Image: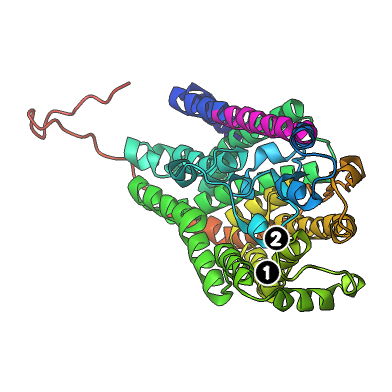
Amino acid sequence: MSPFVAWARLELRQLLRARVLLVTASLLLATGVAAIVDGAARVAAEREVIAALEPALREEEGYLRKTHAPHDDLGLVLYHLAMPIAHEPNEWTALSTGLRDVHPYSRHLRFIGLVPQLYQTDIANPLEQLAGSFDYGFVLIFLVPLFIIGVSYDVRSRDDDLGTEALVCSQPTRLSRLLAVRLALRAALVSAVALALFAFAVAWLGLPLDARAGAFALASLAYVALWFVLVFLVASLGRSSAWNAITLVGAWMAWCVLLPSIVNLAILTASPARGGVELTLAQRQEMNAGWDRPKRATLDPFFARRPEWASTPVPEDRFSWPWYYAMHEMGDAHVAREVEAYHTALARRERWTERAALALPPLALQLLLDRMAGTDMATELAFRDSIAAYHEQLKQHVYPLLFRGKGLAAFDVDAVPRHRFAGAGQPAQISALAGLLGVLALLGAALPRAIRRVDATPRPEARAPETSWFEGASMPRKEPS
């Protein structure tokens, strides 16, 4: 057996004997399993809510038919009736919450103005939102690098800490190979944990083993490899364990926390947009102002938008439901350009985020996972567009009944179109994967110089026996066995 193989076996034996390392790896594995199970439970609960939407609609319709006569004005009934819409999760949604902690999976869409319904979000516990989401993406992107730092920050400097540096340097092989063996063993352990969690996710969630699964597995391993390459580059500098730990934790804070926050602030500053609350307020003010205006001030621009109803007589001396719904539509029309500009700004921000992810591996991996889970901003914008299109379908369906003065008896809820959204899950984002591999390649390009720096390190002489402080210089202190 060659000395190098014997040294590798010794390193493996020492690694397996490190109980703290194995316990920490077990805790990381348990944390990932808990995140996957918790995400699956949340998604299952949301699917139950979505499945109950249609029965709830039937129950609401039955109540309205019991409390209203068949000849009652349909406008009053439609004011209270709400149609269900849903952004159904896919198999990957349990792994990444993304925007789903802000935007709900399901909503109820009424026949009145769209903007207030589209841009108002459910009120949630602010302390819970402040804590953030605990999901598999959080474990992989934030906790796994910390585990890598914890098990490898002293991969080279520990010999100096233990006083065994001279013994290590006396081995008949290059120091860079010994350092690579230590990191390779730890990388195998972390990769095994990551792949075990992914295998558990595949089995627990029923993930299809398609191109998306392969892309995600490749991205996860590339992310792990990237951090180990960074550890090697830092270790090659030959500094102390404390310095290595501070440097690596600083890199983690910069990559995972500080730089994404700075990029987000820069994107928000460069692409300002009128918020959803402001759009809702502007729509409400315009719609409510219609109560104080002549009826023609609302009906004339409405008939200009929908000339097919221009010849329909609408009372101008009293309240009427056609005028009321026309007032809501004109409120939406008043902020239509602002809504379009808002969507354009959000799409621009998403594009700039994708570009920034080319240099920020944690952000790239998060975008990759969010895109497959259907919890990213691009999917949310597509979902909003589908709601706007569906709202137009609803108006096309009920306007003939409203403007012709039909009663409740003429309304059939089964004939009302239902909302469909097919964008719950997207293909893997190739640009994010390319960004991960690109940063890994850039760091890898610095490895040859780091290897030469490690091998060029002067080999220290064996240390003289240390003396006990109370025995004097003539009495050698016994080294522990």
Secondary structure beneath label 2:
loop
State which region is magenta.
Answer: 31-58
Residue 417 x, y percent position in the rendering = 89, 48
| Mark 1 in CB contact with mark 2 (< 8 angstroms) | yes
Q: Amino acid at mark 1?
A: Gly
Residue 211 drawn at (x, y percent):
84, 45
Q: Which amino acid does the dot numbered 2 rest on?
A: Gly
Number of residues whose C-alpha sits closer than 10 Å to that of mark 2, classed few (under 14), some (14–19) or many (20 or more): many
Q: Which residue is mark 1?
A: 331
**Position in image of residue 416 (x %, y %):** 88, 47
For residue 88, the mark is none
- Against 282, residue 128 (above or below) is above
Residue name at image x 55 percent, y 67 percent? 278
Residue 113, disc: 2
In the structure shown, which secondary structural element does the residue marked by tag 1 occupy?
Answer: helix
| Quadrant in which the C terminus appears | top left
The structure residue drawn at horizontal position 59% and vertical position 74%, both measured from the top left corner, is: 271
The reply, left or right, for residue 26 in relation to residue 296 is: left
- Mark toward the start of the polypeptide (1 vs 2): 2
Which quadrant does the N terminus fall into? top right
Q: In this orientation, does residue 441 appear?
A: yes
**Is the residue 421 above or below the residue 291 in the image?**
above
Q: Compared with residue 223, is residue 288 higher up or lower down, i.e. above or below?
A: below
The answer to whether any part of residue 440 appears in the image is no
For residue 142, side relative to residue 346 (left or right): left
